[in-house]
């Protein structure tokens, strides 16, 4: 993975130059150099295919500059301080406020100050050619790149175009919203000062993480959630426990509340809710979902709907187009960097295999099939407490028709949890398939659980029989001993 801090050195970088011919042929053209596009290019180059990568903003994409990296850099001190405040002998030393300037400076470093030199070097090291500009399909196997100077380059494609253009924040259709200058995830992750009062609209991962970060950094946060709880896609206790902690931290959470109008007057944001309440704030963040960045990439020239999520098979090939792939957020399978990079590895292998003239048959997909996208997706919500899950929740497993049993364990009874912090609050749920005696899903909530979820990912992905899990002995005294408590609870149920 190319990160903002990758330091692969090379002098073979090829950027667009006016001396280049107007039309150039490549084996593969990748639209978008986010984490996913970078990894597709890495794989196709490793397979010896000439590869062009087109990027209209920064190499590294949303993840590096306005999403994963800056958000986690903001949250890390918040979570560490919360844990330190629960640690005997340490808590007395960390009662003061966070050093906001230092946190924001750390975030700026982690976002590479919104400069992509490091990632440009990394991409160059793969041997791919970078074209800076906006890429659009101009028919089958043809991409036109328009540079910032308006100059156009035509890239013709022998084997595959991979659309890795990602997603952007979706704003609701509210009158006057644009004039009110709302924050999206971009502003929430890159703001240079702390708003006194912040309204967060939404109850998903971005809303919850950003509410946690800015509340700890000094904002008075009000969260407006249309549904009944936070993190509705996870087990219900995840949203409940995170909401309880956010409330304890001083945030206000209003569920069952929609925004009817937003205006800004003399710098102050005024919100009217559907219940008629009026709320004022200094900034308002809309974290109300994502839209695909496929509205201006020439989809209409090949009979596809501009602005749609692209439907793909398990080799990431777009339905009905044997040369077109959509990888990462653009295909809407799992809007997560690690899952997009997994898809990139698979798409790269599938493109290379097909380019070599070998067929990739459904029954023989093996390494070429993104099977983990269906029911083995792991996710960590980096709040205090953390919430982490993999696979299916109880409701999802039942909906999918599995005969399952859920067992719950209170993490406060696990020795390693008690050692981790004083008064540890946490919970785990394991969803077991009663037919196959394997795990369908696991959810953990509590301090430090983010680092535990990969053990469950292995168990779910590898379909480890419950009987074998007894032989995967967790170290004492770690929070991982929750595995023993879950197995005992399942045995005794
Ligand atoms: C606030 C926030 C926090 C997140 N935190 C996490 C996290 O902790 N962990 C995690 O796994 N996921 C996280 N995500 C999700 C993650 O950011 C995305 O899943 C990931 O960035 C998707 O990668 P991508 O390469 O598909 O798209 P992007 O990262 O969006 O990259 C797409 C690239 O394509 C370029 N592009 C678009 N259109 C064109 C065009 N026509 N021509 C040329 N270039 C184009 C864009 O400029 C961009 O650089 C978070 C998201 C948000 C919003």
Image (spheres, rainbow, N blue to C red):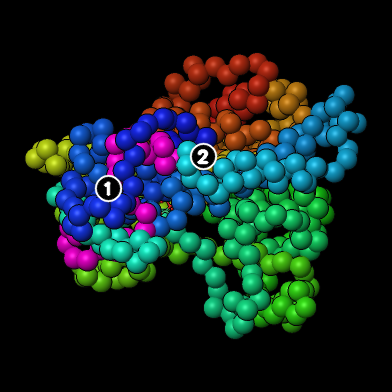
Q: Nearer the viewer, residue 471 or 182?
A: 182
Q: Relative to 269, does residue 124 appear above or below in the rendering?
A: above
Q: Quadrant of residue 78?
A: top right
**Which mark, residue 292?**
none
Tell me, yes or no, whether the two marked residues, 1 and 2, touch with CB atoms within 8 Å.
Answer: no
Is residue 105 something that shows in the picture? yes
Q: Position of residue 192 (x, y in %)?
A: 70, 54
Residue 140 inside the magenta-drawn segment? yes
User: Residue 44 lies in what quarter of the image?
Assistant: top left
Q: Residue at x 85, y 43 (%)?
A: 97
Write down the region rendered in magenta.
119-142
Residue at position x 74%, y 63% in the image:
198
**Residue 379: percent from the left, percent from the top?**
52, 43
What distance separates the C-alpha of mark 1 from that of mark 2? 21 Å
Residue 35, picture quadrant: top left
Q: Is residue 55 above or below residue 454?
A: below
> Residue at position x 62%, y 23% from top?
481
Q: Is residue 109 left or right of residue 324?
A: right
Q: Could you tell whether 444 is left or right of 298 in the image? A: right
159 inside magenta stretch: no
Mark 1 lies on residue: 52
Q: Which mark is residue 4?
A: 2
Residue 71 in the image, given as x and y percentages of width and height: 62, 47
Q: Tell me the quarter of the image containing the N terminus.
A: top left
Choose the circle earlier in sequence order: 1 or 2: 2
Ligand 1 has an atom within 8 Å of the beta carbon of the residue at disc 1: no
Q: Secondary structure at mark 1?
A: strand
| 136 vs 274, nearest the viewer | 136
Tell whether 316 sits left or right of 73.
left
Q: Residue drawn 81% across and 42% down?
A: 98
**Residue 181 position within the rendered picture, expressed as x and y whole percent measured from the top left:** 64, 72
């Amino acid at each position: 993975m190319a990160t903002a801090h990758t330091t692969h050195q090379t002098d073979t970088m090829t950027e667009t130059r006016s001396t280049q011919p107007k039309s150039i042929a490549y084996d593969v053209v990748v639209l978008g150099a986010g984490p996913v596009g970078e990894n597709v290019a890495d794989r196709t180059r490793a397979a010896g295919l000439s590869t062009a990568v087109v990027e209209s903003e920064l190499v590294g994409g949303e993840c590096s500059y306005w999403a994963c990296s800056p958000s986690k850099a903001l949250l890390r001190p918040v979570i560490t301080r919360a844990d330190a405040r629960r640690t005997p002998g340490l808590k007395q030393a960390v009662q003061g406020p966070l050093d906001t300037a230092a946190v924001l400076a750390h975030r700026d470093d982690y976002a590479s100050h919104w400069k992509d030199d490091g990632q440009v070097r990394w991409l160059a090291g793969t041997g791919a050619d970078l074209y800076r500009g906006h890429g659009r399909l101009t028919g089958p196997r043809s991409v036109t790149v328009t540079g910032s100077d308006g100059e156009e380059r035509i890239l013709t494609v022998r084997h595959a175009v991979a659309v890795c253009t990602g997603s952007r924040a979706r704003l609701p259709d509210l009158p006057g919203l644009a004039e009110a200058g709302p924050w999206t995830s971009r502003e929430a992750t890159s703001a240079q000062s702390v708003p006194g009062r912040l309204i967060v609209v939404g109850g998903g991962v971005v809303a919850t993480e950003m509410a946690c970060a800015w509340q700890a950094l000094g904002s008075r946060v009000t969260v407006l959630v249309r549904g009944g709880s936070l993190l509705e896609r996870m087990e219900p206790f995840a949203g409940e426990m995170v909401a309880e902690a956010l409330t304890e931290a001083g945030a206000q959470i209003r569920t069952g509340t929609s925004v009817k109008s937003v205006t800004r007057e003399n710098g102050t944001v005024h919100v009217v809710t559907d219940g008629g309440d009026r709320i004022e704030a200094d900034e308002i963040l809309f974290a109300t979902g994502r839209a695909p960045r496929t509205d201006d990439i020439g989809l209409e020239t090949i009979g596809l709907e501009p602005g749609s999520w692209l439907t793909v098979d398990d080799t990431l090939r777009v339905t009905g187009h044997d040369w077109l792939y959509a990888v990462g957020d653009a295909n809407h399978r799992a809007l997560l960097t690690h899952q997009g990079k997994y898809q990139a590895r698979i798409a790269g292998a599938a493109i290379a295999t097909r380019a070599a003239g070998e067929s990739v048959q459904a029954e023989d997909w093996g390494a070429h099939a993104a099977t983990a996208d269906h029911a083995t997706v792991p996710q960590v919500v980096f709040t205090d407490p953390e919430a982490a899950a993999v696979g299916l929740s109880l409701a999802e497993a039942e909906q999918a028709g599995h005969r399952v049993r859920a067992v719950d364990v209170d993490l406060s009874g696990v020795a390693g949890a008690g050692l981790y912090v004083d008064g540890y609050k946490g919970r785990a749920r394991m969803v077991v398939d009663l037919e196959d005696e394997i795990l369908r899903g696991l959810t953990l909530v509590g301090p430090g659980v983010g680092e535990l979820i990969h053990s469950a990912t292995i168990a779910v992905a590898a379909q480890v029989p419950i009987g074998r899990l007894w032989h995967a002995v967790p170290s004492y005294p770690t929070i991982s001993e929750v595995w023993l408590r879950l197995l005992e609870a399942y045995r005794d149920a």
